[in-house]
Image: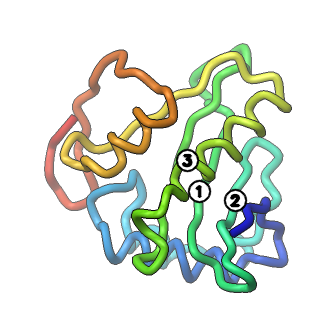
Amino acid sequence: MRVRRLTAGDWIANRAIRLEALAEFPGNYFTSLAEAEARTDADWQAMLADPKMAIFGLFDGEALAGLTAIYIADADPSGKTAGFAMSYIRPAWRGQGHAATLHKARLDWARANGMERVIVSHRASNEPSRKAIERSGFTRTGAVAHLWPDGVAED
């Protein structure tokens, strides 16, 4: 297994796995499947070229087994806060510790880009995500009410 940053040339694979994640877990992400399906090819390519974001793929040989992202948070005017996003591991590769590998890739990117703070969030009912976040050393600092794309209000 290896992790590498996706490039604009990976946009088709990125789109496929992202749409898969949104279809499988429609309420666990800030984006809905419909919003993602409405993106143009140029939108998908631009996402991978955005200097304020890094999207990483988890590869088993040539097979894209997982996806994750980190972005510079617009809400912090200092530009020193990053946020985790889009974590998804395909079913055949779950339960094998790969979430920690994806967390490490993002933390390495955060350090290399001068981030002083990293925000990680998950839907309150998403226990696998919570456990993976805690195993990577993060601690809970609070909760924020959110209306998820599936219409459910939950921290």
Q: Nearer the viewer, residue 25 or 59?
A: 59
Query: On the picture, is 32 further left or further right than 52?
Result: left
Q: Quadrant of the N terminus?
A: bottom right
Q: Position of residue 103 (x, y in %)?
A: 59, 44
Say which quadrant the C terminus sits in: top left
Residue type for callout 1: Thr
Q: Which residue is mark 3?
A: 100
Q: Are marks 3 and 2 in contact (CB under 8 Å)?
A: no
Q: Residue at x 57, y 69 (%)?
A: 66
- Image height of 52 relative to 27, above or below: above
Residue at 72% from the left image edge and 47% from the top image edge: 53
Q: Residue beneath label 1, please?
A: 68
Q: Are marks 1 and 2 in contact (CB under 8 Å)?
A: yes
Task: Judge the density around disc 3: few (<14), some (14-19), many (≥20) Cα neighbours within 10 Å.
Answer: some
**Residue 6: image location, x then y, percent:** 77, 66
Q: Position of residue 125 (x, y in %)?
A: 19, 46
Label 3 – label 2 distance at C-alpha: 13 Å
The secondary element bearing badge 1 is classed as strand
Q: Residues within 10 Å of mark 2 (few under 14, many from 20)?
A: many
